[in-house]
Image: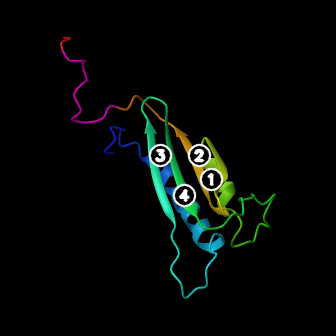
């Protein structure tokens, strides 16, 4: 990965699965405009080296996601947040407030870094005049 994380297929797979579920939820449940109008879904990643990777998905809905208690075994839908809960180390959601009221929400998922992450090609920073 470009952020210095090993090519840990299990870790990357977890992140991609959760990202896919959160984006799908934003598209399916977060739409607030008519189908004929464009709507934006945002995605952001943040890395706190040696600690965690966070991903954030934003949409225009103020509705906070609520996991289903237990979808029926033959259900085709309703397992997205259960997968997010199982594959991420934690997740949370919060509405985005503006002066006029709610302007949407952000859903964050967090993953503990599997090992020390070192950014490639970034020399150690030193204060001027120090060696």
Q: Are marks 1 and 2 in contact (CB under 8 Å)?
A: yes
> For the residues marked 3 and 1, what is the alpha-carbon distance in whole angstroms?
15 Å
- Residue that numbered label 1 is attached to: 84
- Label 4 crowding class (10 Å Cα cut-off): few <14, some 14-19, many 20+? many
Residue 88, numbered label:
2
Is residue 126 within the magenta segment?
Answer: yes
Residue 99 place in picture, x, y as percent: 64, 59
Is residue 101 within the magenta segment?
Answer: no
- Residue that numbered label 4 is attached to: 57
- Label 2 crowding class (10 Å Cα cut-off): few <14, some 14-19, many 20+? many
54 vs 125: above or below? below
Q: Secondary structure at mark 4?
A: strand
- Res. 74 image quadrant: bottom right
Bounds of the magenta segment: 118-128
Residue at 22% x, 28% y is 123
The first of marks 4 and 2 along the sequence is 4
- Residue that numbered label 3 is attached to: 10
The first of marks 4 and 3 along the sequence is 3
The first of marks 3 and 2 along the sequence is 3
Q: Are marks 4 and 1 in contact (CB under 8 Å)?
A: no
Q: Residue extending furthest bottom?
A: 36
């Amino acid at each position: 990965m470009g952020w210095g994380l090993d090519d840990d297929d299990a870790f990357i797979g977890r992140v991609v699965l959760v990202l896919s579920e959160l984006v799908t939820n934003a598209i399916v449940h977060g739409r607030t405009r008519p189908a004929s109008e464009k709507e934006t879904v945002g995605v952001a990643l943040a890395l706190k080296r040696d600690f965690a990777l966070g991903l954030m998905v934003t949409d225009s809905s103020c509705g906070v996601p609520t996991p289903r208690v237990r979808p029926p075994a033959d259900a085709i839908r309703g397992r997205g947040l259960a997968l997010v809960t199982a594959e991420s180390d934690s997740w949370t959601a919060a509405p985005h407030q503006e002066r006029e009221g709610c302007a949407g929400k952000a859903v964050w998922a967090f993953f503990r870094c599997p090992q020390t992450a070192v950014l490639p090609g970034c020399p150690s920073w030193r204060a001027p005049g120090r060696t």
